[in-house]
Structure formats: structure tokens, C-alpha cells
Amino acid sequence: MSILQSFEESLNSRERWIISGLTSAHKIQGFLDLIPYSSDAFYRCPLRVLRERVAHCFDGALFAAAALRRLGYPPLILDMIPNESDDDHLLALFKHNGHWGAVAKSNFVGLRFREPIFRNLRELILSYFEQYYNIAAEKTLRGYTLPLNLTGYDRYNWMTTDESLELIARRTDEIRRYDLLTPEMISGLSPVDKRSLKAGLQGANEAGLFKP
């Protein structure tokens, strides 16, 4: 039995109805936007996200990767790397007509969906730069990893059980990383203005915010 078949057979009728409606990357993002942001320190597999209707960025990226896989995309995730004053942030990637887009669950308004209009991953990640900041109004994005294809974890049933999620999280820490900024660029960064900071935190779960 394939991992997709196992996932489908694990669903109850309501879960099957919900997942059947996620027929595009935009609709997958819509589902993630509707559920609360989790402040939990543990990970949830895609089935558990669907069942419990809660997720943080790691859970949301894996759920989106699983949902995109049902639509024929490879299940790819990518980790965006901040400085030491912020959390990293996971994206689920998809490619349409040769261009990259992303789906994500975030406590910040600007760190979610991206249309598939980006020619390469660097362009995609840089589109998050101005919205990637902490509650101290510091712009914190510094780099990103190579994509990780989750098919390598199919033998652990990552779509339906939590057992392999720590392995996936550790792997994102080991993958090759690319820097975005030079030291000179970093030294010249301006703080985020109050209006943008307030806008980005609309609807945020305060318990889930990184405290620098």
C-alpha cells in the first residue's frame, strides 16, 4: 500500500470531504489560514493536523506538502533561516509552469502563500525578506536550505504518524544552506516601521511568538 493510499484510508467521512476540497495550492493555503496557530513544542503529522485542526509552521508545511502531493506535486519543504533573534520558518514548495510558489502556516501575516511566479528559489525566498521580522522589529531572514523531498521518509509513514517528524526536523538542520545577505548588508538594515509590524501581527497567537 502506498503512503497516499494509507493516508486516504485513515480518513473519516468528514476528513475525506475536507481534503477532497483542497484542489489547488491556494485552497490548501485557505485551509491552513482557517485553523489556529499552534504554540505547542511538538510536531503533528498531516493526518493529525487535519483531525485536530491546529498547526504551527512545521506542521503546516508538512500538511501542505502532503496535500500538494495528492495533486501530483512532489512533497517538498524548505527551511528559511533567520539570525539568532528569531525562529526559522518552513515552506511547502510547488512548481507550476516552470515557476516556484509556496504554501505555509505562519503566526505572521506576510509569511504565508506565494503565487508560482518566481523563476528560482532565491527569488522566492527574497520575496519574504521584508515580512520576515521579529517582535522587536528586526528584519531577521538570513538564508535558506535546499529543498527536502519527503518521499525519502515514506517508509516512516510521515503523513499519518508523528514518529518520523523529529527525523525530518533534524534533517532540515543538516541540509546545505545558502546565505542571502553580506555582513555589510546586515549592518545597514533598518528596523521595521510600526505600521508594518502591527499589520504583520494581525491575528497572531502571542503564545507562539518567538521572544528575542
Image (cartoon, rainbow, N blue to C red):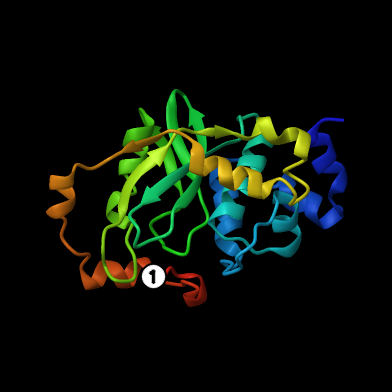
Q: What residue type is labelled 1?
A: Leu
Q: Residue extending furthest top?
A: 98
For the image shown, how many numbered marks are present on the structure?
A: 1
Q: Quadrant of residue 42?
A: bottom right
Q: Quadrant of the N terminus?
A: top right
3 with respect to 142 (left or right): right
Between 143 and 160, the one nearer to me in the picture: 143
Q: Where does the image place residue 34, in percent across and percent down from the top left?
A: 59, 63
Residue, disc 1: 201
196 with respect to 107 (left or right): left
Q: Where does the image place residue 106, in percent across and percent down from the top left?
A: 48, 59
Q: Is residue 184 visible?
A: yes
Q: In which quarter of the image is residue 193?
A: bottom left
Residue in view at x 71 percent, y 45 percent = 164
As helix, strand or loop, the secondary structure at mark 1 comes to loop
Residue in view at x 59 percent, y 67 percent = 38
Q: In this view, does 14 lie above or below 146?
A: below
Q: Can residue 71 be seen in this view?
A: no
Residue in view at x 69 percent, y 35 percent = 153
Q: Where does the image place residue 105, in percent across and percent down from the top left?
A: 52, 56
Q: Is residue 85 above or below residue 68?
A: below
Between 141 and 121, the one nearer to me in the picture: 141
Q: In which quarter of the image is the C terminus?
A: bottom left
Residue in view at x 50 percent, y 44 percent = 173
121 with respect to 90 (left or right): left
Q: Where does the image place residue 152, in percent across and percent down from the top left?
A: 67, 30
Mark 1 crowdedness (10 Å alpha carbons): few <14, some 14-19, many ≥20: some
